[in-house]
Amino acid sequence: MSKAFGIINFAGNHIRVDGLQEFRPVGAFSFLGRYRTIDFPISNMSNSEIENIQVYVRQKPRSLTEHLGTGRHYNINSKRGGLNILFTEHNQIGDIYSTDIAAYMENMDCIEELHFPYVVIAPSYMVYTADYSVFLKEHIESGADISMMYHSVDNAKESFLNCYTLNINKQKGVLSIDPNHGNAKNRNISMDTYVMTKELFIELVKKAHKMSSMYTFFDILNEECEELDIRAVPHRGYFAAISDFNSYYHANIDLIDLKNASGLFDSDWPIYTRTNDSCPTQYFEGSQVKSSVISNGCLIEGTVENSIIGRGCTIKPGAIVRNCVVSADVTIGKGVHAENLVIDKHARLVRGKRVIASPEKPGYIKRGDAL
Amino acid sequence: MKQNNMLAMILAGGRGSRLHELTKKVAKPAVSYGGKYRIIDFPLSNCANSGIDIVGVLTQYESILLNSYVAAGRRWGLDAKDSGVFVLPPREKSDANLDVYRGTADAISQNIDFIDTYSPEYLLILSGDHIYKMNYAKMLAYHRECNADATIAVIEVPMKEASRFGIMNANEDGRIVEFEEKPEHPKSNLASMGIYIFNWKLLRKMLLTDMKNEESNHDFGKDIIPTMLNDGKSLYAYKFKGYWKDVGTIDSLWEANMDLLDKNNELDLNDKTWKIYTEDVTALPHYVGADAVIDRAFITQGCVIDGEVKNSVLFTGAKVAPGAKVIDSVLMPGAEVAEGAVVTRALVADGIKIGKNAVVGSADSKNIELVAKRVKGDE
């Protein structure tokens, strides 16, 4: 059992995914057909033997609570451990007040009553795998106040634009945390993943709350950089931040390549999700499927190329689905050509025969919409 | 949900020796089917969907895997407060020696104490190795409507095949007048599906008598049903329409899998109102490579397809490498076909690897080839 409890934070105001976010928080986004983005941080925690996990939600909790349930499917011990979904009421007032600090303050009694000496915090809008037990162990051995994960990237000019970057000295000490303005290729992207003692965490939250009602946890860390010993811990393997519409689209499409996927999925590190008990996918005569990732419960008669197909989709004869990220229960009608799209749950593309966006700017088809 | 007063007992002790290596280590009900299922998922899911809360599973032959599989009742949603799946292998009792189940009826007799703890009004007896979807609540309603002592589900089979089955001869009202086990000259084509509903009080009495009868085979078909008919009890035939398959041989198991490839096939596993539940495996959605060709197939999560798959069913984690061909075949969980290998009209058992450029099975074979050992290829 871990010495830490886990916190899964919601995406802050700097994260904006057009379309999809109207219907659910980023953590509940469909990912690679059968997953939701939040499956990754929860599975990481569960696999790291973190038994007590708090999931913070600030808006539109329906799909997230439905997906998380009791948390049993995440292999969390149902008696000793627990998965708590904690809400914040501050979203009523407006986004400015709806910060992670406000959510932690509101639920402070739930944090204080936990008997774990450490806390691991991970975001719900980033997709990666990491062993937090190693992260925690190295943190304790280092003697640092806070350890935080980062991922070195060479495409920060065009990607990770809503993310934060770490300015690190040679000893891996964090000097400052800054927004990524996209003015350099090579950056250390903050993974918003931290470990520290529970006491320090509570202290920082209370301090931030006193200083400003709009402060986030990142703001207080930035403020305390000079006072505190904050260590940066590099992460290797697959890493994606779902920070805007394009990054959502590309994070999915990138994983069609099995080589990329093997940097995220490992049979020793299972990613759990809620099963829907769908039957296998049925391919009919005439189906043509290439370079794609297909979930269960689909009926495929048409053509699918370089796409991700969610659970329970129907691809009718003569339909062409190319470079698309398709959520669950979508129908692509006879002869419909869909290209470069994110197609949200329950959408039906039937009448409009050509729904094609440009590859530079993928299109979005609304949840439940009929085209 | 409130208990509907009917308890189900699934007979899952069968060895299924005509399935050869597939049942060497597991009992027939635990054999994989349909990409992601095991055969016993069907009666268990039917129970759950029919509102039956208590299910006893009678295991005997090679039962370790089956016991642990079935014990996780929540897979089928049978995990509410008053609900559960109970694994019932033969056990030693204070007043009797440890004894194997001597027959289908004896398996129930030896668990009278278990059934008594729930004091059900009706007992549903099922077979653990049939593939079908059935609402047992409807059968119970029919049983009550007929005021029957026992009701037996029957299915119409082609007349020329009727002599392979236990045949029920019923009058116009559906009342059974005669039962013939594998008759040479069948009088009707209503085959028993091995699904019975009994009034528990009556059956209990009969089982206690049957236990002491040294002449008896302790079998429902051979002993209990004929005795009831002789005693003038009212037995009714409940006609079932739909897909039903007893997969006794490699050929019939293969065939049952192939049935799933048909458009609008009768079993319809995609029916959202009657889902078949199974083990929840943590596997990726299936991956289809850049040069893959898939034509008529049933494919589940965890598969990776880079070669050609035609008229085939691929189970969890099966892999088809670039340039490999899988035609008219079934790849059981974890089976792998290496580059250039060709598999035709074969059933490749769990975890079996087919080596590079190896050729397995042939298009004009009479029987389906069971591949239960690794096939070496070019190194």
Image (tube, coloured by chain):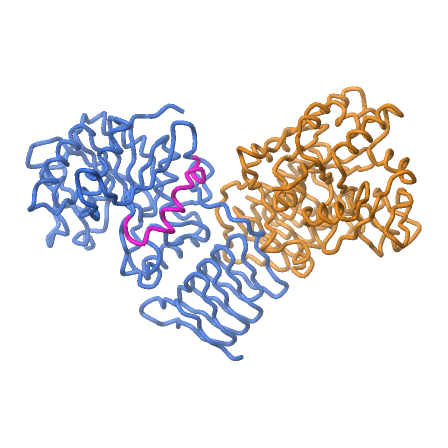
Chain colours: A orange, B blue
Q: In the picture, residue B47 is in which quadrant?
A: top left
Left or right, B2 with respect to A232, comes to left
Find out whether residue B70 is within the magenta segment. Answer: yes
In the image, residue B261 sits, relative to residue B71, either above or below, namely below
Q: Position of residue A128 (x, y in %)?
A: 70, 49
Residue A351 appears anywhere in the view: no
**Front in this rendered view, residue B79 or B143:** B79
In the image, residue B25 sits, relative to residue B59, either above or below, namely below
Residue at figure coordinates x 17%, y 41% from the top left:
B96
**Front in this rendered view, residue B192 or B241:** B192
In the image, residue A214 sits, relative to residue A189, either above or below, namely above
Q: In the picture, residue B306 is in which quadrant?
A: bottom right
Q: Position of residue B169 (x, y in %)?
A: 13, 41
Secondary structure of the magenta portion, mostly? Answer: helix
Quarter of the image for the C terminus of chain A: give it: top right
Quarter of the image for the N terminus of chain A: give it: top right
Q: Position of residue B94 (x, y in %)?
A: 20, 38
In the image, residue A338 sits, relative to residue A119, either above or below, namely below
Left or right, B131 with respect to A164, comes to left
**Front in this rendered view, residue B30 or A51:** A51
Find out whether residue A302 is within the magenta segment. Answer: no
How many numbered badges does the structure rendering display? Answer: 0
Residue range (magenta): B60-77
Left or right, A161 with respect to A112, comes to right
Residue B58 appears anywhere in the view: yes
Q: In the picture, residue A8 is in which quadrant?
A: top right
The single residue placed furthest to the top in the displayed view is A93
**Front in this rendered view, residue B84 or B365:** B84
Left or right, A154 with respect to B55, comes to right
Q: Position of residue B283 (x, y in %)?
A: 55, 51
